[in-house]
Amino acid sequence: MKYKVLWLTLFYFNSLFLAAQSANIPTNYFQNPLDISMDLSSNFGELRSGHWHMGLDIRTHARPNYTVHAAAQGYIAHIGIRPGSFGQFIIINHPNGLSTLYAHLNSFFPELQAYITKQQYAKKSWAIELDFQPQQFPVPKGFIIAKSGNTGGSLGPHLHFEIFNTKSGKRLNPLLFNFPIKDDLNPQILKLAMYDRNLSVYEQAPVFYNVKNSSQGFILANESIMKVGSNRISFAIRAFDKMNSRASRNGIYMAKLFFDNREQIRFVLDSIDYDETVYINAHIDYQHKYNGGSYLQHLSKLPGDKGPVYKEKESNGVLYFNDTLEHTVHIEVYDAYGNVSQLKFMVQYDSSLAGQYNSASGHEWAPNKSNVLLKKGFEFFLSPQALYDTVEEVFDTKAEATPYTFSSAFTVGNDAWPIHDDALVRIQLNKQVPAQWQDKLFIVRTTKKGTTEEKAVWEKNWLSAKFGSFGKFQIQADVQPPGINNLGKGDTVNLTKARRIVFKPTDNFGIQKFDVFLDGNWLMFTNDKYKYWIYDFDERCAPGVHELRARAEDKAGNVTEKTWWFRR
């Protein structure tokens, strides 16, 4: 009977809390933007690489071209066409101070599509961003604005839908707006992780505890009492939510940590700004995920975390023990509909277990302060905002001489440790650069995930650039021009049966600009998902013989041009 009373009490207070969270949310204001049910493949706040998911992904039965409607009255304020990211998208501003975003679209409604195409040709750019005044494209609620698709960074046909504050840009959780989505299922807790907080979270691997569901909620699967050898610990959880319509594992909305029945901290995924979304790297165990593990969500706030999701109550989530008594810990996990699951267990400090973790040796860099590394031929600068927790100062240098390298290779830190804002890297040249190569120098960063490069800024015989992670750094010259595939064979390529022209320009450091000219006039090629540039034959290319010229330029300014004659 006591458990029934407990759960009824929890439900009552959870309902009050969720109602308070959504007190300023206009329910029933927005309609479903599709004609089909809102079957979600992803929800707001789900964990992604380098960001939280900022909206809802609505399934479109693995097909494009479903009708997309304006979710409420307003006007089209912005459109964008990008090779990655949202692909083709629309933003509508509404009179209540909120905006909606619709992304991965296949096409826009005819009047808007015609206007955009005209602007693309005027700017000679397929990728484009356009702002509009209220009188240009007003839309009533339910107006057909687009067809759904799979453009940009989408991995399959769906509609990405966001709601945000027009003035601040802060994204709001759409599940708080009372859309027709049924969810009466409790979240699931899969695993518990424990950290010794006398150490940095980056100086250790978490200790895992299996959990299982029982009639009393979730409990530890193999221990009646968790015994710990550290007097300062914190926890993280692996958890997910599920909805009635599918078996998909969606993100949770909120989690609370209690110690001896007193709430210590909670995180709530109700509103996030795009400028804040990189703080997910402090919210998760970044090192564990980077090294191939699953997502773990911290139930404590790291020292350098200035993000929006944690609400501290009695502590930052680090639990302190000054006795050897048994203490109660319980964790509550919620979805946006008030469904809740609870994990409850006992913890006891045992000093005889101390020393099971090894602290890092050597000099360390701490969060909330500037950190500088000065070595011969190499300098590395971190701002006070760069680190979330303490990391060991790691440095190595290796001579790697090739005709295109102009410094040794310098390794700093561990690329499994996140950096919040860019680090400044300065490297000294170790040999003379030919005059014709001096504007083609990059600093290249290498990690186990791959390489990235930034155009270097000269400062006498030093070069500098900014990077968002640790790794191995070296000055390299890019003197290799891009490659352009051939249009076809023969002096006049026969394209009479072709429906499109496809180019796949390549470059070792990446294509900066690619243009195609038909009979001397710029011709628009789409570049969705970066890899291919595609032109579908239209009225701009009449039957007959034409000249086609393709020009590719890389980030270093190396250029390749090819010209063909073809018959359509």
Image (cartoon, grey):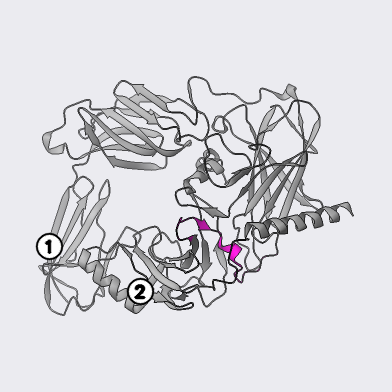
At label 1, counting other C-alpha atoms closer than 10 Å, the crowd grade (few under 14, some 14-19, many 20 or more) is some
In-front residue for pair 60/131: 131
Is residue 176 covered in magenta?
yes
At label 2, counting other C-alpha atoms closer than 10 Å, the crowd grade (few under 14, some 14-19, many 20 or more) is few
Q: Is residue 486 visible to the viewer in this orientation of the structure?
A: no
Question: Which mark is in front, 2 or 1?
Answer: 2
Q: Residue at x 22, y 49 (%)?
A: 554
The rendered magenta stretch, by its main secondary structure, is classed as loop
Q: Is residue 277 left or right of residue 186?
A: left
Q: Which mark is residue 135?
A: 2
In-front residue for pair 567/121: 121
Q: Which mark is residue 45?
A: none
Q: Amino acid at mark 2?
A: Gln
Location of residue 228 with respect to 134 vertically, above or below: above
Instruction: Determine the secondary structure under disc 1.
Output: strand
Is residue 28 covered in magenta?
no
Q: Is residue 407 left or right of residue 250?
A: left
Q: Residue at x 52, y 20 (%)?
A: 361
> Which residues, given as a range, are shown in magenta?
165-185
Q: Quadrant of the N terminus?
A: bottom right
Q: Which mark is residue 563?
A: 1
The image position of residue 242, as x and y in percent, is: 64, 60
Q: Amino acid at mark 1?
A: Thr
Q: Quadrant of the C terminus?
A: bottom left
In-front residue for pair 245/419: 419
Quick one: label 2 or label 1, which is nearer the N terminus?
Answer: 2
Residue 30, picture quadrant: bottom right
Location of residue 455 with respect to 216 vertically, above or below: above
The image position of residue 459, as x and y in percent, is: 22, 30
Instruction: Determine the secondary structure under disc 2.
Output: loop
The image position of residue 502, as x and y in percent, is: 26, 65
Q: Residue at x 78, y 26 (%)?
A: 323
